Image: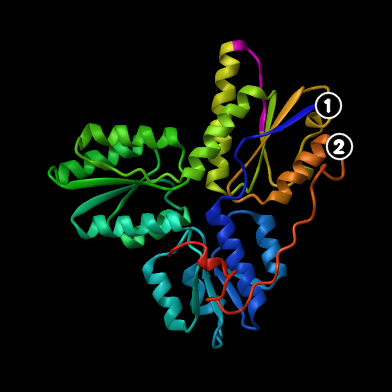
Amino acid sequence: MNVIRASVLGYCAGVRRAVDIALHEAASASHKVYTVGPLIHNPAVLERLKSRGVMVSEEESEADTAVTPVRQDDVAIIRAHGITPKSEERLRERGFRITDATCPKVKKNQMLAKELAETGYRVFLAGEKLHEEIIGIQGYAPGSIVVEDAIQAMQSARALYAEQPAVKTALIAQTTISIDDYTAISETLQTVFPAIMICNTICSATRERQDAIRSLCKKADAVIIAGGRNSANTRHLLAVAESVCAAAYAASGVCKPVILVEHAREIPSSFLEGTVYKTIGISAGASTPDDIIDEVERTLRGCRRLPGSRRRARPRQPADSTRQGDPRNAHPK
């Protein structure tokens, strides 16, 4: 059996930065460290952070009860998906020292939404209504309209046009949305508001991983996607792969199964026999760490350690956030 990887997979820069920030805070002092909601959408990573003393407040609205009492220098880390301005203000009022691990590209979306709303645009947000990134952006653009698909986009656009036919409109994408879904939503909105400003805000990491899995599906007989089931970008990778493989089945009658696993132990036996599928492809969401990807490949190959792999050691970071090595200095705010 041949095992191949997608050309781009696993941690994106924003996720890696957020995890590095959390580890730095956990190691640098004796204060308590909390994340405002799950830092990223990967259960294995969250368990590792918990073992280092990084605690999770499930919702920022719980800050008044879930993380009290607050001692001087207790830290609240803003998750990679961001939070609303009001939530951040509440945390400061509670006395937390705020460390912002919001992905720089999500932060850029927040500022864009704020600017558009303040200049008179009615902002459409293409994404999942209950996703933390969308909730956070809504806080910067009160009155924004969330649409999850083309059908909702048409319904919302017609309703807005009936009330305000001359209103200026703009569309912002959740950074992890499927490219195909965003195209369908934008084209639908343009039928009602031809002059709508379409903002190209899908993260390049999302595009690269979706393009890579399309290519992978053409080479593999079966595909495994490693990542958290609650991760939007991972679910979108799964949807892209299923779409490509369904098209291949319609064209040639060849069935290419696609599965999502959070751990290698979830890989079904049919993938491990070595006779059912000649080539198995591996992809992974942007919040999936390297060692889980390696574990999936080792399991498929039936070996305990991949050739050339070695345990990755992270140096202890200095406590002073202005010193060299602090992950918060790796990207501009």
Q: Nearer the viewer, residue 194 or 103?
A: 103
As displayed, is residue 313 above or below residue 64?
Answer: above
* Residue farthest along the left direction in this orientation: 166
Classify mark 1: residues with Cα within 10 Å, few (<14), some (14-19) or many (20+). Answer: some
Q: Residue at x 84, y 45 (%)?
A: 305
Of the 4 image quadrants, the one containing the C terminus is bottom left
Chain part drawn in magenta: 252-258
Left or right, 95 with reference to 156: right
Of the 4 image quadrants, the one containing the N terminus is top right
Left or right, 39 with reference to 122: right
Classify mark 2: residues with Cα within 10 Å, few (<14), some (14-19) or many (20+). Answer: few
In the rendering, at what x and y percent does residue 187 appear? 30, 32
Question: Is residue 272 at all visible to an observer of this figure?
Answer: yes
Left or right, 156 with reference to 37: left
As for residue 256 lying within the magenta part, the answer is: yes
As displayed, is residue 185 above or below residue 309?
Answer: above
**Residue carrying label 1:** 274
Q: Nearer the viewer, residue 146 or 48?
A: 48
Q: Which mark is residue 302?
A: 2
